[in-house]
Image (spheres, rainbow, N blue to C red):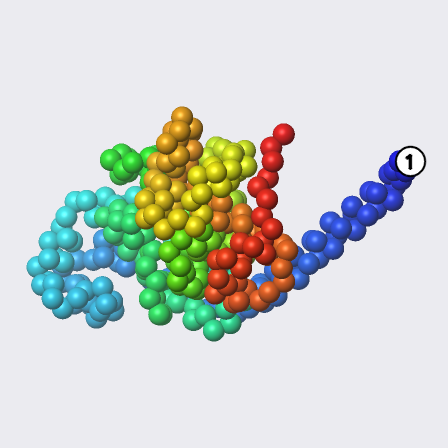
């Protein structure tokens, strides 16, 4: 016989669950907010754009790593007079007029990374004009983080007219923090020894899971670089994507073409079906992310151990089941 639902007690229980969940989250965030991080943001992009030719020696002395000795001064002097870098610098100054917004976003990211990786060395930041080198938007060395701010002017900016949409959609200010998190996530996740498609899925899935932890205010779409429509498509088709991977027996395949079809950034994923044009690229990374999330929901292990956990164990113990849509 079905028991009558006690609405009052049910609401109380739900309230307690929410309260415990919020308190648990706030404890982590409170601990993170208390972590001191100190770094500088140097605007080489603006300094170079505003410099006179006579000030080149001073810039070279201040930023020696950015003026390699093998390049003659004539190259830099020519660039100072070049129209395009000046136009890019002017556009960047409009979107990023000061260091404040950059410092604010990166301060939070660095705190979150430091919480999970106590030995993380917080880098100083140097912003540059990269001539829209969107393949290298963010570069991290041991002590310096270089950001090409001309890659974050907004998806519809005129400077991006010749850039394919699947790339330009992420050339916006809101992607700066996710891109920085990506660089450091990639450094932490161990490269898989296996060459299987499953190993690649989980390699990128681990990186996206770190972004869950390091970007608490970002949307899932921003973390993976999808539009909201693309994210919704992935969620609604998760079960069908997974069924395809299982039926086509690709999980343990070592075919290198699978990465091109489902992991490499692209206009769409390549199932070789009618749905291809509707799908976003990197759908394999999306699935890997969901598997890692499932694993962490069902297992209690240190984060550092997850970074080196072998793909087969992770997959088996994740008990992953794709979300079913009504």
Q: Residue at x 90, y 38 (%)?
A: 3
Relative to 292, residue 303 above or below: below
Horizontal arrangement in the rendering, residue 310 relative to residue 15 (left or right): left
* Residue 223 in sight here: no
On the image, the x and y values in percent for residue 219 come to 52, 44
Residue 264 sits in which quadrant? Answer: top left
Q: Nearer the viewer, residue 13 or 255?
A: 255
Q: Residue at x 57, y 67 (%)?
A: 302
* Quarter of the figure that contains the C terminus: top right
On the image, the x and y values in percent for residue 67 come to 18, 64
Q: Residue at x 28, y 59 (%)?
A: 44
Residue positioned most to the top = 274
On the image, the x and y values in percent for residue 198 come to 45, 51
Residue on which the image places disc 1 = 1
Q: Nearer the viewer, residue 273 or 57?
A: 273
Q: Nearer the viewer, residue 96 or 250?
A: 250
Horizontal arrangement in the rendering, residue 265 relative to residue 18 (left or right): left
């Amino acid at each position: 016989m079905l028991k009558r639902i006690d609405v009052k007690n049910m609401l109380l229980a739900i309230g307690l669950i929410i309260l415990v969940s919020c308190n648990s989250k706030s404890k982590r965030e409170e601990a993170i907010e208390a972590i001191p991080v100190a770094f500088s943001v140097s605007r080489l992009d603006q300094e170079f754009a505003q410099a006179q030719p006579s000030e080149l020696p001073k810039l070279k002395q201040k930023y020696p790593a950015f003026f390699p000795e093998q390049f003659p001064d004539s190259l830099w002097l020519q660039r100072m007079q070049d129209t395009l870098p000046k136009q890019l610098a002017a556009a960047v100054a409009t979107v990023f007029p000061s260091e404040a917004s950059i410092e604010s976003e990166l301060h939070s990211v660095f705190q979150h990374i430091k919480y999970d990786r106590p030995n993380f060395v917080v880098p100083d930041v140097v912003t540059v004009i990269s001539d829209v080198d969107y393949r290298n938007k963010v570069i991290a060395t041991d002590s310096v983080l270089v950001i090409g701010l001309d890659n974050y002017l907004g998806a519809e900016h005129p400077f991006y007219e010749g850039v394919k949409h699947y790339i330009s959609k992420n050339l916006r200010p809101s992607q700066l923090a996710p891109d920085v998190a990506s660089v450091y996530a990639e450094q932490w996740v161990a490269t898989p020894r296996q060459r299987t498609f499953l190993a690649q899925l989980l390699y990128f899935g681990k990186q996206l899971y770190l972004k869950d932890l390091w970007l608490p205010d970002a949307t899932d779409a921003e973390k993976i670089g999808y539009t909201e429509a693309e994210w919704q498509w992935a969620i609604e088709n998760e079960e069908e994507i997974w069924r395809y991977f299982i039926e086509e027996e690709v999980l343990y395949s070592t075919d290198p073409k699978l990465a091109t079809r489902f992991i490499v950034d692209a206009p769409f994923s390549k199932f070789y079906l009618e749905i291809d044009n509707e799908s976003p690229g990197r759908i394999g990374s999306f699935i890997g992310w969901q598997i890692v999330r499932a694993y962490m929901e069902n297992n209690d292990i240190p984060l550092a151990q997850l970074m080196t956990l072998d793909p087969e164990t992770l997959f088996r113990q994740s008990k992953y089941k794709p979300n079913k849509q009504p």
